[in-house]
Image (cartoon, rainbow, N blue to C red):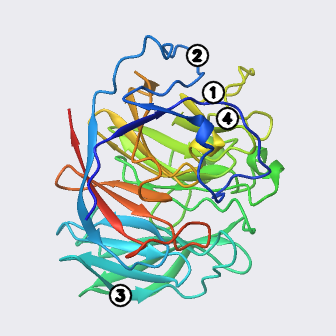
Amino acid sequence: MRTAALVVAVGLVAAGCSDPDEGAGAPSPSASVSSSTPASTPVPSAPSSSAAPQGPVKLQVAGTVATGIEVPWGLAFLPDKTALVTERDSGKVKRVAGGQASEVGSVEGVDASSEGGLLGIAVDPQYPARPYVYVYYSTGEDNRIARMTYQGNRLSAQQTILEGIPMAAVHNGGRLRFGPDGFLYAGTGDGGDRPNSQDDDSLGGKILRITTDGKAAPGNPGGRPWYSKGHRNVQGLAFDGKQLYAAEFGQNTWDELNAITSGANYGWPGAEGVSRLDGMVDPIAQWNTDQASPSGIGAAQGHVFMAGLRGERLWAIPVADGKRTGEPVAFFTNQYGRLRTVEAAPDGSLWVTTSNTDGRGDVQDGDDRILRVTITR
């Protein structure tokens, strides 16, 4: 077992690439600087790197929860503190308990070509009174959200509640998260068709807010299923109290962490990163694409924790009330490979999944795995 408590900080410098979504390869060595130095992100109101304080939290990998999972993507905890994890390519859902990941069922109709497949998962907030889980998956035609019954450690009764989310080889989004309001939020991608993000009638390039039956939640802009628009590819959603945060893949220059509000426009395709354009909401933090390529995020102890695929690191971003309160700090850089999902666990730790078996990483013995990460101050 490997343990790590080293804080690695990275200067964020500009570099281009054709499409960094889930891009392969480690960050450029020239981008790395010495440990214990906070990262500098060129976002308005951010302190300079020379004046920024040390990050207020320390992270340590305390152990491995489970190994041998094939391209884990979504992860959701059950009330009994076990968890369900999706396998992107196999279409299987596994229950993680006692150090083992055991299959409890599969999702029918999954098309796992390119970046699609079985993606996000969420447990009904009234479980087990309402014994349902919700999955986001790709088919040969579109991306869909389905509700399934989960009882006796078995999945059954798959029912599509929302379809028609644009699907393509890239930019499928896929994260699911229940909000404190009881509604289901879903991050979608533009499906490789940029105009979708600004098209009010498209489900692509949006954060959706729907009921457990797949209808538009009350109070959504214009009575539509979406809550915010102007997104390129949202794979990370997390609530800190009532505040929703979202991680978003950039194109060539900037990946983003956004504070989400109802009806807001986050700029894509007209803006990438901080733009200061009228009518567009800027991110609260941004990274060069080789430092992040962010997927899942989790919120705990006044921070958003963001997994980096191409960046191969876990970012800790201090936040409060939709604002960034300090410099992002990177942990575990290049130690565990590509990181996909972060979930705050019932015991106060973080569960972090690797994504090295997805065809774009260097597979290590035991991959893919779920790491248990403790948070201290």
* Front residue (pair 151, 360): 360
Mark 1 and mark 4 lie on one chain; the one further toward the N terminus is: 4
Say if mark 2 contacts mark 1, CB within 8 Å.
yes
Q: Is residue 278 visible?
A: yes
Give the residue number, with chain letter if any, for mark 4. 265
Say if mark 2 contacts mark 3, CB within 8 Å.
no
Q: Position of residue 198 (x, y in %)?
A: 77, 44
At mark 2, the secondary structure is loop
Mark 1 and mark 3 lie on one chain; the one further toward the N terminus is: 3
Give the residue number, with chain letter if any, for mark 3. 103
Q: Is residue 155 visible?
A: no
Q: Residue at x 47, y 52 (%)?
A: 334
**Could you say which quadrant of the image residue 156 lies in?**
bottom left
Q: Quadrant of the C terminus?
A: top left
Q: CA distance from mark 4 to mark 3?
A: 40 Å
Residue type at numbered disc 3: Glu
Give the residue number, with chain letter if any, for mark 1. 282
Q: CA distance from mark 2 to mark 1?
A: 10 Å
Q: Residue farthest to the top?
A: 51
Q: Position of residue 98 (x, y in %)?
A: 17, 77
